[in-house]
Amino acid sequence: MSSDGNRKQFWKRNAAKVPGSIQHVYGAQHPPFDPLLHANLIKAGNKPPPATPGKPKKATTFQEFESITSDAWDVGDDDDELLAMAAQNLNIEVVMETANKVIENHSKQQERQRLDDTTELEQREEDTQEEAAEDEEEDEEDEEDRGEEGDVTSPEVSFASQSSPYTDGRLVKSHSEAPIGSPKDAAGECAALHRQRSLPHRPPVIPLVARMADQNTSGTPAMTEREASRLDKFKQLLAGPNTDLEELRKLSWSGIPRQVRPITWKLLSGYLPANAERRESVLQRKRQEYFGFIQQYYDSRNDEHHQDTYRQIHIDIPRTNPLIPLFQQASVQEIFERILFIWAIRHPASGYVQGINDLVTPFFVVYVFEYIEEEVENFDVSSLQEEALRNIEADSFWCMSKLLDGIQDNYTFAQPGIQRKVKALEELVSRIDESVHRHMQQYEVEYLQFAFRWMNNLLMRELPLRCTIRLWDTYQAEPEGFSHFHLYVCAAFLVRWRKEILEERDFQGLMILLQNLPTMHWGNEEVSVLLAEAYRLKFAFADAPNHYKR
């Protein structure tokens, strides 16, 4: 069967089964975009009609490319001003120093681990040799003693006293002391031990949400001196009458301690003002405004005009993080339904699109932590006071709305923002790792087939939720983090798996790998390394736009 036939058979068999597949990420209001048909049309020379009349002009510089991938609300902004703003809002030297330090520390840690493994192996070999030598001396003494007493060694003992290759070099005096397993079993044990020593160190299985390195809660290790120092810096900065948002971004880029993450996210997203005296009044006003929307619009969810939107939301909510018990609670699902329905009818240009439901969860978890200290994964939200739940719901709605305001062209008709960003990812990967790019081309893997979900869900289906929260710390601190910096994170994320990608030799194997990347054991360290690599890519290509295009 041809590769094209294998590819079609794979999608036909797996489209309805793979969570988050392309079939699962379109809303009820929009017809699904078929990436295979789109790719085949382009290959056949039938390019899709342009959205506007006139021949599109090919971008020749990174600045021109950036202008066409700007958000719907930023059209016409000068790219030079954007870059200047990025440089002003975030001290590049600070971030680069942090990025290099993270990578250097990660490399040193891996080197120490290799040295420790080598030393341990050498020590075991020395111990084995010493034990063998001691046993040999003891046997010689025993034979001398028996010789002086006139004993004759029986053939059985004489045969068994020979060194066995399956006893770690030790001498065996009788069959009762010999290993019970066969030579084949012993060889298998040796091979298993060798594989175990050669495998990288895996951390223990950890919960999907609560176990974060910067948490100091029950069941987690106490904060280190460095973590305590960073927490103090955050508290001092937040305690002032007017919070310096530029300094807050610098601190937040490397991660935000759990204790101050709720207030920091609200400030960085623009939900709260920098002036401390105004915050309480703003919170009360915005929360009342949200529940005013509930009273005004939520009863219309079963009307003919809105019932399709509500039905799709109602179907999608139980699929949101199905492995985390917190999100399977009826009261939590009702909160999510209200948030998504109100957002959809207030944004008719896009309406509700599958994938937006995932974007509520990080805000919800972070704002739950504002009221509890225990792990959130199995927390029963019904134990919270009603006022606390209402505050969490309203704050999650407004902060999700702030996020979506910057990437709404990802969810308008035909999702043009995502298509542009996937194309940009393909161009970027072709420049930074040509081997991976050519490997994809060789086996006819289109970037849209796997990276659509990366853009639509902001990598939330590829990473544990604890990693998403850490990732969003940096996105909130980085100018245009969710719309622009995310592209470089996706490029660094793809190249991170280059070894596994290059080992796959067919379309189906590549697609299964790219839709099920092994990140379950990832934590803050892996995310920090990913972000450092992404920043280095952004720094290199933003300052050298000619490197971006062929």
Image (cartoon, helix red, strand yellow):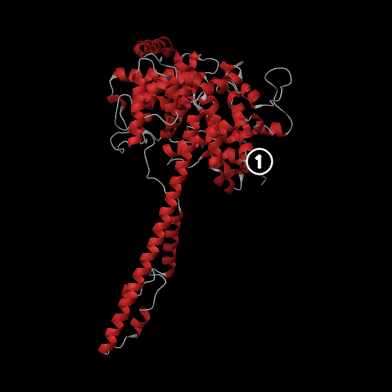
Q: Please identify the quarter of the rendering in which residue 548 is found.
A: top right
User: In this picture, is 376 found above or below 272?
Assistant: below
In the orientation shown, which residue stands out farthest toward the bottom? 150
Left or right of residue 361: residue 429: right
Is any part of residue 352 visible from this angle? no
Residue 540 or residue 339, whichever sits in front: 540
In the orientation shown, which residue stands out farthest toward the front? 93
Residue 172 pos. (x, y %): 34, 75
Left or right of residue 45: residue 481: left
Quadrant that contains the C terminus: top right
Give the residue drawn at x 50%, y 20%. 404
Secondary structure of residue under mark 1: helix
Residue 334 or residue 524, whichever sits in front: 524
User: In this picture, is 261 found above or below 72?
Assistant: below
In the orientation shown, which residue stands out farthest toward the left? 149
Residue 224 or residue 209, whichever sits in front: 224
Give the residue drawn at x 36%, y 11%. 278
Q: Please identify the quarter of the rendering in which residue 121 is found.
A: bottom left
Residue 264 pos. (x, y %): 39, 23
Left or right of residue 139: residue 40: right
Q: Are there few (<14), some (14-19), or many (20+) residues within 10 Å of tag 1?
A: few
Residue 114 or residue 352, whichever sits in front: 114
Q: Please identify the quarter of the rendering in which residue 299 is found.
A: top left
Q: Mark 1 is on which residue type?
A: Gln
Residue at the spot of label 1 = 441
Residue 149 pos. (x, y %): 25, 88
Residue 223 pos. (x, y %): 32, 35
Is any part of residue 277 visible from this angle? yes
Total residue callouts: 1
